[in-house]
């Protein structure tokens, strides 16, 4: 079977399944859960079927125009057909590409909300200051996209830096757009505390985790060790007076989550469990992704936190993403969140191209 006939067979299956779902949804007596399940699949297939219809209509027009262009009749009609045929042949590959992109398996986490974690890396106080700037960059970016940004935990240093900061970001396709931000972000600049004007290199790590539902990850009580302790650092009047802070250790994996932002121990425990569930879900997702893409060479989307993904050079006003060799000389707009989409869109396109190459 040729690649083209294989694609045609796949498109036929999609169109048939879409018709089956339409008929099934019109049948009486369906349970509510079944209706929701079938509706979701029908909705997912609809844009593919619409693209297939556009592609097949164009293919049919190519066949008709080819016959007209070769017809020995009216020369004017033949020239017009040849002109339209040329334009249509140029459009066909774009329609085919669109269909292939829609057929790519979706990352089930793409539509989920996300938990964002930034941490200071190498570089002491300067690294902590940069971690805080990155956190605020994502906060501004979320606001620009109309997403909700809820700060869950911040561990501050003395002069405004963040040792660690965690937030929940809610909205449309949050994880899809932010998942490639995971990794090591490097900064090159002269620190405010540097008297000699020497450029320092520091780093902060970013982790973006898809928010997990209770049904995704089942956590046994026996697998948890929960410690309570007194909160420390900035806070309200009850800080350091009650054992409201919570530390949860997941014994099978050794993952530890602490939460102390709330005055209520119950609320801190709920927030900590939310972060723990997201980390366990991401761990499973990454294992599945590693198995699926073991032979893939592209570095986009590995989510490896040890990987240096981007460098922010303040003296030269440039930001470079090393995975796609893209440099923007607009560091202020990147840090304000305005130009972040230029990196994100390029990373998404690169990921699509790499996944298309795998299936073609």
Image (tube, rainbow, N blue to C red):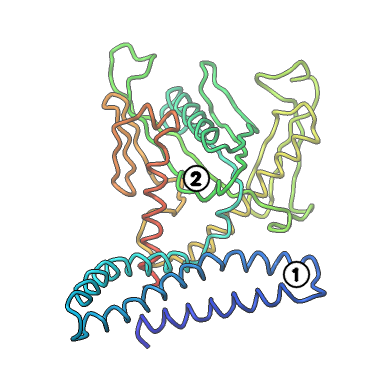
Residue 7 image position (x, y, % from top left): 42, 78
Q: Which residue is most to the bottom?
A: 1
Query: Which residue is more in the foreground, 200 or 152?
Result: 152
Q: Residue 3: image x %, image y %?
A: 36, 81
**Quarter of the figure with the N terminus:** bottom left
Q: CA distance from mark 2 to mark 1?
A: 32 Å
Q: Label 2's element?
A: helix
Residue 60, quarter of picture: bottom left
Of residues 225 and 335, the one nearer the viewer is 335
- Residue at 49% from the left image edge and 47% from the top image edge: 177
**Which numbered circle lies on residue 34?**
1
Placement of the C terminus among the 4 image quadrants: bottom left
Instruction: Name which of mark 2 and mark 1 comes first in the sequence.
Output: 1
Note whether 159 is above or below 16 in the view shown. above
Which residue is pictured at 74% across the width and 68% down the height? Answer: 35
Q: Which residue has dot 2 on it?
A: 178
Give neighbour class at mark 1: few <14, some 14-19, many 20+ (Cα, 10 Å): few
Residue 208, how many percent across, how many down?
53, 44
Q: Give whichever of 301, 284 is nearer the camera.
A: 301
- At which x and y percent is residue 230? 75, 26
């Amino acid at each position: 079977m040729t690649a083209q006939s294989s694609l045609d067979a796949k498109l036929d299956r999609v169109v048939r399944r879409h018709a089956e779902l339409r008929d099934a949804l019109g049948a009486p007596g369906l349970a509510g859960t079944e209706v929701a399940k079938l509706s979701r699949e029908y909705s997912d297939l609809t844009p593919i079927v619409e693209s297939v219809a556009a592609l097949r209509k164009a293919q049919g027009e190519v066949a008709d125009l080819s016959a007209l262009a070769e017809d020995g009749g009216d020369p004017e009609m033949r020239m017009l057909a040849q002109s339209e045929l040329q334009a249509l042949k140029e459009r066909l590959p774009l329609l085919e590409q669109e269909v292939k992109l829609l057929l790519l398996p979706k990352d089930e986490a793409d539509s989920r909300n996300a938990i964002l974690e930034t941490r200071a890396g190498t570089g002491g106080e300067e690294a902590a200051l940069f971690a805080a700037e990155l956190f605020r960059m994502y906060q501004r970016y979320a606001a620009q996209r109309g997403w909700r940004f809820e700060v869950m935990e911040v561990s501050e240093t003395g002069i405004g830096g963040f040792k660690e900061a965690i937030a929940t970001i809610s909205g449309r396709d949050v994880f899809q757009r932010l998942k490639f931000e995971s990794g090591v972000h490097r900064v090159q600049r002269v620190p405010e505390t540097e008297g000699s004007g020497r450029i320092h290199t520091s780093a902060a790590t970013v982790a973006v985790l898809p928010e997990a539902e209770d049904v995704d990850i089942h956590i046994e009580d026996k697998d948890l060790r929960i410690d309570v302790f007194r909160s420390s650092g900035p806070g309200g009047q009850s800080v350091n007076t009650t054992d409201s802070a919570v530390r949860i250790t997941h014994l099978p994996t050794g993952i530890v989550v602490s939460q102390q932002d709330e005055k209520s121990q119950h609320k801190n425990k709920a927030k900590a469990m939310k972060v723990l569930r997201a980390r366990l879900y991401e761990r499973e997702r990454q294992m599945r992704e590693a198995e699926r893409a073991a032979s893939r060479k592209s570095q986009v989307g590995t989510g490896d936190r040890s990987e240096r993904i981007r460098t922010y050079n303040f003296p030269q006003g440039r930001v470079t993403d090393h995975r796609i060799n893209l440099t923007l000389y607009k560091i202020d707009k990147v840090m304000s969140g305005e130009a972040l989409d230029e990196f994100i869109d390029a990373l998404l396109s690169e990921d699509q191209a790499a996944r298309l190459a795998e299936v073609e």
